[in-house]
Image (cartoon, rainbow, N blue to C red):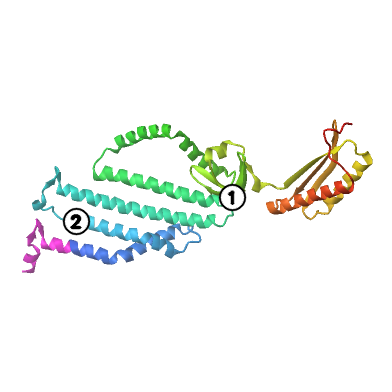
Amino acid sequence: MVSRLFDFIILDNTLGTYILISGIILLAVSLKQYISRLIATLVFRIVKRVAYGVDRSSFVNLVTPPLETFFVILVTLVALEKLNYPHLFDVSIYKVSLHRVIEIIAMIVMITTFFWLLLRIIDFIAIILEQKANVTESQTDNQLIVFFKDFFKVILVILGILMVLKFGFNFKITSLITGLSLAGAAIALATRESIENLIASFIIFFDRPFSTGDQIKVHNITGTVERIGLRSTRVRTTQKSYVTVPNKQMVDSIMDNISLQTQRRAFVQLEISAHTVPDTIRQFVLRLEDLMQQRRDRIENYTVFMADIVKNSYVVTIEFFTAPIPVADFNELRQFVNLGIVQLMDEMNVKLASKEDVL
């Protein structure tokens, strides 16, 4: 009696087949979390040497949700393949059979879930690389990781769409790729400047002429780099304005990375009146050297000398160098030196040259 009940046919399949397939699916649902965590743990053991600094729970929690869904869908599709498609449902929708529509939907769900899993793995790899990048002082590594994470995600999404078109709709993707290549060439010609800026961003990322936080000078713009994008670099100027400079100009132009200076330089050139007696000039140069000596705590080396004799003046040059101290401290030091020079000129009655002075 029980065997006859299992042999009872419903929609071209026996009741026993329905019960068996339902049991397999329910078993997969009940065991999905355990099996997915087991698979994730085994995979983590393989990559744990690369995943230094990331604990197992982080990887498992990140990969388990898409792995559970993928496992259940895979088992469900394999189990449903054992069923005979009912002739009652053998209908067409816009000349496409319902059976084919169901197969397409199942294939789309399967491919989508698989690529969801791959995207989570990319996120995990990015976490590993970000933790390693945080150890270094440069912020360029962090921006490079974010860029390539998004780049590979876009590539995976494109591959997923192509696989759906190929295996779901039997579309000839070779002709699609050819069409996309032609369209891409046309777009590349129309957006040549943007592509040049994109290539320049790669040069900046790999050559590292500057990094986020560096103070630079380019095209008469001096400021601090706040962000390096794929098209442009954002600079906070000394006037606190926010300037956007195309990356191509950052690469092609002469750029001074002020943050990499080993010393800061100050230069003062005095054109002293030609009526000044030689002994006064000699004493003036000596007093200037004494002035430099007063700030040896900041001034690393200096030069004070009478550099030239021109038509209506004697040229005295003062040049000094400091460590790469903050700009505010450097300006304070320059002010001290300039005020000291003015005071010495007043004390010694040293005048600057004018148009009336002639040797």
Q: Residue at x 26, y 64 (%)?
A: 29
Circle 1 or circle 2, nearest the eye: 1
Please provide percent x and percent y for residue 125: 45, 54
Give the residue number, with chain letter if any, for mark 1. 240
Relative side of 98 to 73, left or right: left
Please provide percent x and percent y for residue 84: 13, 53
> Where does the magenta region start and end?
1-20
Asked whether residue 41 appears in the rendered view, the answer is: no
Q: Residue furthest bottom?
A: 1
Asked whether residue 89 appears in the rendered view, the answer is: yes
Q: Residue at x 29, y 38 (%)?
A: 173
Give the residue number, with chain letter if any, for mark 2. 80
Relative side of 279 to 73, left or right: right
- Considering the image in quadrants, where does the N terminus appear? bottom left
Res 20 → quadrant = bottom left
Is 253 magenta? The answer is no
Nearer the observer, 237 or 154 = 237
Please provide percent x and percent y for residue 249: 55, 37
Q: Residue at x 25, y 58 (%)?
A: 75
Query: Marks 1 and 2, how far apart in space?
Result: 66 Å
In this picture, is 145 found above or below 42? above
Q: Residue furthest front?
A: 356
Q: Amino acid at mark 1?
A: Lys
Verify CB contact (< 8 Å) between mark 1 and mark 2.
Answer: no
